[in-house]
Image: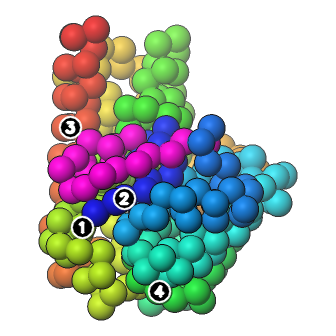
Amino acid sequence: MRIVVTGRHGQVGDALLHALDGLGEVIALGRDQLDLSEPAAIRTALRELQPTLVINAAAYTAVDAAESDQAMAFRINADAPRVLAEEAERLGAALIHYSTDYVFDGSKEGSWLEEDTPAPLSVYGRSKLAGEQAIAEVGGTHLILRCSWVYGLTGKNFLLTLLKLAETRDALSVVDDQVGAPTWSRTIADATAGIIRNAGEPAQLAARSGIYHLCAGGHTSWFGFAQAIFAHPSVIRRPALHPITTAGYPTPATRPKNSMLNTDKFRRIFGDLPAWDDALADCLRRRGELMTKA
């Protein structure tokens, strides 16, 4: 199996390099090797590499910046997935693509199902939804995996931002009226590897094509997430935490109040997923080990 991974230096892309070990020849491409804003470059790369599986872990993820950079957000999050899907279908390859909870408006009482009607509130959410729709229109063998509140030990994310702020601040105010499932990038990568491992060959994914929700079990608020981070024994600096409302922390992009994704479909077909707090503890334990080695 030849697997091409985009977004080599992103949170999920980096985690995939470890998770995919032993599953085939992995060719990981960063932005310097593949510019997803250039359709011709995507076509050229895939036709030269001839993959049997494409995993698109690259995205324009600057949610607030996208509000004033709509053209680029749609180029990377909508146009590029269409081209990847077209080239994958041309090669007879499977495509795994990651999407987001931000395709929903957050108005539902319970957790969101795959078949619920999307209604994104932001440019970022609209661009990611357009990418989903483009892949579905092209057809071919594809899995669209919607993830939520992704964090890890690399890149820019809530976990690393809070740990950095804690170095110089004695108190932090954190939004407490948005709920979702914090999901470690390694959880996503391991689940993706499990899908591939269980399928045997990419062609066997054809019968499972469609949208799935892939995130950790349970849910919390951003404030609850912060509390769990600073409660871990490996974290030394522990600022006072103050809960605030969304209105108390205005941002250019509107976030959904309810980002809870129902993962029953994924669990039924592909297997179990860890609870968000268990995965966070594992992540922070791993961070502690790396700091000790350093």
- Answer with mark 4 or mark 2, whichever residue precedes in sequence: 2
Q: Label 4 amino acid? A: Gly
Residue 226: percent from left, percent from top: 39, 37
Q: Which mark is residue 196?
A: 1
Secondary structure at badge 1 equals helix
Per the image, the residue denoted by label 2 is 3
Q: Quadrant of the C terminus?
A: top left
| Residue type at tag 1 | Ile
Q: Is residue 134 left or right of residue 239?
A: right
Residue picked out by circle 4: 140
Q: Residue 190 vs residue 89: left or right?
A: left
The secondary element bearing badge 4 is classed as loop
Around disc 2, counting alpha carbons within 10 Å, would you say few (fewer than 14), some (14 to 19), or many (20 or more)? many
How far apart marks 4 and 1 lie (CA) works out to 16 Å
Q: Which contiguous range is marked in magenta?
A: 14-31
| Separation of marks 3 and 1 at Cα, in angstroms | 26 Å
Residue type marked 3: Ala
